[in-house]
Image (cartoon, rainbow, N blue to C red):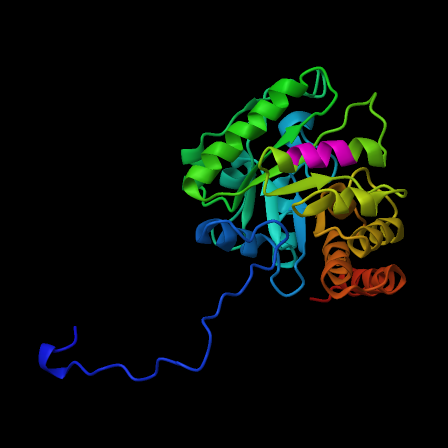
């Protein structure tokens, strides 16, 4: 504590310089509170404005998905190369080292399985548990056009309202049923609904026609889902096209952990997302890293 008899008047007031009011770098987030912006700036790289999320929450409705039968073996080697971990609280507590410092987007929905109607979910994580787990964001699906559309949207609204109370952003995932047409009209509708109800960013799918219009019509960032496993070159090309047309990154699971070399693949994806590496060069990077790793390199 300063001595009371040693207080000096301030003198460096910068009178000739206007007050600095730096806009937040992320689309649609300029009016958010400091804590919300701080968490989003952990999820999205402030330099590139993008993110590489590693999704391994598939087991909450699929069970032991190929590639992540053993989360404790499959995921830790990938953590250094991901920007964000997207998982359930059970997986986080059981399999992820607490020394990992990457932000967590916490899957907060459950209540169904691949044996039943996917849209019939519920909110399965209390906000207090999300806080205990130091979640950077919480997430659930909206199933626009599905049997339980209303219930799924209500779930995300609940997450948004409780998350806002504590400064935790919400990611809305646009779930797609088997009978839905995956086109610009559908994803434009679903992503816009997600943003309009207050989601802070949205996870959707890349489509070949009209994706740029989907992004333009959504007032918050969109990250793309990796979807089903593709050959590595095709997955890298999809990521490149998505960010080139305005996506703020990817949330990939199967295209990383089902790759022949997951550690090489996630680094190649990062090069595309953050450095605008073209898919051909990124695929060569993947092959070179795979060769090194196969030979026992670091």
Tell me if residue 90 comes above or below residue 261 in the rendering.
above
Q: Nearer the viewer, residue 69 or 61?
A: 61
Res 112 visible: no
Q: Residue furthest left?
A: 5
The quarter holding residue 107 reads top right
Range shown magenta: 188-194
Which residue is at the front of the view, 109 or 89?
Answer: 109
Q: Quadrant of the C terminus?
A: bottom right
Q: Is residue 193 magenta?
A: yes
Q: Is residue 27 left or right of residue 246?
A: left
User: In the image, residue 287 lies at what x, y percent?
Assistant: 85, 61
Q: Which is more toward the observer, 52 or 49? A: 49
Residue drawn where x is 76% and y is 47% of the image: 216
Instruction: Between residue 126 and residue 97, name the one nearer to us.
Output: 126
Residue 60: x, y in percent? 62, 29
Residue 141 x %, y %: 65, 30
Q: Quadrant of residue 267?
A: bottom right
- Percent of width and height locating residue 171: 60, 39
The dominant secondary structure in magenta is: helix
Task: Name the residue: 75% across, 36% down.
Answer: 66
How many numbered circles does the render carry?
A: 0
């Amino acid at each position: 504590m300063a001595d009371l008899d040693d207080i000096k008047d301030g003198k460096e007031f910068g009178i000739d310089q206007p007050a600095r009011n730096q806009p937040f770098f992320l689309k649609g987030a300029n009016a958010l509170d400091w804590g919300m912006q701080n968490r989003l700036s952990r999820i999205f790289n402030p330099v590139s404005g993008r993110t590489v999320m590693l999704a391994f929450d598939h087991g909450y409705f699929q069970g032991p998905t190929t590639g992540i039968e053993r989360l404790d073996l499959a995921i830790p080697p990938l953590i250094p190369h991901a920007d964000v971990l997207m998982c359930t609280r059970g997986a986080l507590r059981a399999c992820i080292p607490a020394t990992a410092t990457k932000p967590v987007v916490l899957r907060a929905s459950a209540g169904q399985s691949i044996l039943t109607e996917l849209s019939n979910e519920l909110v399965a994580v209390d906000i207090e548990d999300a806080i205990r787990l130091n979640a950077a964001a919480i997430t659930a699906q909206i199933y626009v056009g599905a049997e339980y559309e209303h219930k799924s949207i209500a779930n995300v609204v609940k997450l948004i309202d409780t998350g806002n109370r504590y400064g935790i952003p919400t990611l809305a995932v646009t779930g797609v049923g088997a009978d839905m047409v995956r086109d610009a009209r559908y994803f434009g509708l679903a992503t816009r609904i997600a943003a309009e109800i207050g989601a802070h960013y949205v996870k959707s799918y890349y489509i070949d026609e009209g994706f740029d219009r989907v992004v333009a019509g959504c007032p918050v960032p969109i990250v793309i889902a990796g979807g089903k496993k593709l050959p590595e070159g095709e997955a890298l090309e999809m990521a490149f096209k998505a960010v080139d047309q305005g996506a703020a990154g990817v949330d990939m699971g199967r295209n990383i952990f089902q790759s022949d070399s997951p550690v090489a693949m996630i680094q190649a994806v990062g090069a595309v997302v953050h450095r605008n590496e073209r898919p051909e060069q990124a695929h060569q990077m993947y092959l070179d890293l795979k060769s090194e790793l196969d030979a026992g390199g670091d």
